[in-house]
Image (cartoon, rainbow, N blue to C red):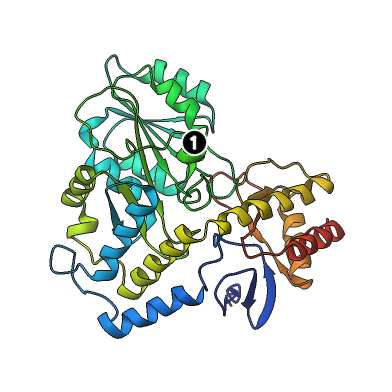
Amino acid sequence: MNPDPPTIPIMQSPPGAETVIDGRTYLYFVGTGYLGLQGHPEVARAACEAIGQYGIGSATSRTGFGNTPPVVEVERRAAEMFGLDDAFYFPSGYAGNHILTLALSERFDAVFVDELSHYCVLEAAGLSGRPVQKFRHRDADDLHAKLRQRLAPSARPLVLSDGVFAARGEIAPVADYCSVLSEYAGGILCIDDAHGIGVLGENGCGTLEHAGLFSASVNAESDDDEGTRLLLCGTLSKAIGGYGGIIPGSRRLIERLKQSSPYYAGVSPPPVPVAAATARALQLVMAEPQRRTQLHKNAGLLKQGLRRLGIATDDTPVPIVCLVLGDAANMQRIQRQLMQRGIVVAYMAAYSGLGPEGALRMAVFATHTEQMIGRLIDELERVI
């Protein structure tokens, strides 16, 4: 007789500082809704209004009359947020690296990828059609050594990495990577900034802006090999509160991506209500920078509280904390006991970048109060 499958918890409200799971309201420190927009009433209202006007979706690709006003509006709003000419909006952020490497495959000869990058980054490297070499996590010196050892003379390298690592909350040292790549004509650095967009940088443009590297030359089409080329892709489903992948850039590059990508000509665009909600969420992110300010404050409060418990954390504004507290059984116990006390954190048994014991992952949102964060710290102290 086969055992019953494990019960999967059911979320019964939008993810937020307080979230209903299996009929009970918890303090929720899980997931990626960093700015607290997934349940915002204006975001939900935009989706409802779009359904009434346009239906669920276009049921065809964007080259087959599948463009709809909400989809086009997302691209316009994203371009505005990043201060670039245009943007490409597609169904999932997972595909961003694939889209860029496919379109620009003739511009690089070998791929070097952070060994703890997200699955989608590693997959894009493998599908690039070029030799792939991993380098040690966030180690610019090892990248430098690997380039010298493995790159043929006059070959052009592509370096792939997360901007913010999803489970560990670490920021890639992108300025150091640019310094390394400055020795190589035609070098490209491509950052998957799924967890950086909306979170880092003065305007929420992500890891490159946080490092002082964001400019109009990011995601620009270029015919020469002068300087290091900077590329980024991301998602709108996390901090932004909508859904789908986004690549902002120059008009010339975006036209190139759309012409070469099956995600433009071969699949339906994101559903209309999702696009409408995402466009409204982008407006809110730009109009309310205080959300990001509060998020950074809350990240600091969480990390300060953990340090008071003797738990080492970084001091970056990233709202993710990764804790390894003993073995898997101990961390599962901590998660269960916190849940009994009305607090949810994630135990991740396996994820890109984690060791065999897994980790506890905590995420704080802009909508958490100081009292909520204090309660998490107090209850964690009781169970560890």
Position of 367 with respect to 216 (left or right) is right
Position of 368 with respect to 181 (left or right) is right
- Residue 155 versus residue 310 in the image, above or below: above
> What residue is at 79 percent from the left and 60 percent from the top?
374
Quadrant of image for the N terminus: bottom right
Q: Is residue 157 visible?
A: yes
Write down the residue under mark 1: 115
Find residue 296 and report its horizontal and vertical position in percent.
63, 51
Quadrant of image for the C terminus: bottom right
Find residue 231 and report its horizontal and vertical position in percent.
35, 39
Position of 32 with respect to 259 (left or right) is right
- Residue 127 versus residue 342 in the image, above or below: above
Extreme residue toward the right, this view:
382
Position of 166 with respect to 381 (left or right) is left
**Residue 5 in which image quadrant:** bottom right
> What residue is at 63 percent from the left and 80 percent from the top?
22
Find residue 52 and report its horizontal and vertical position in percent.
31, 85
Find residue 253 and report its horizontal and vertical position in percent.
23, 43
> What residue is at 58 percent from the left and 41 percent from the top?
170
Amino acid type shown at disc 1 = Glu
Local packing at callout 1 (Cα closer than 10 Å; few below 14, some 14-19, many 20+) is some
- Residue 183 versus residue 86 in the image, above or below: above
- Residue 380 versus residue 101 in the image, above or below: below
In this view, the residue in front, 95 or 175, is 175
Q: Is residue 90 visible?
A: no
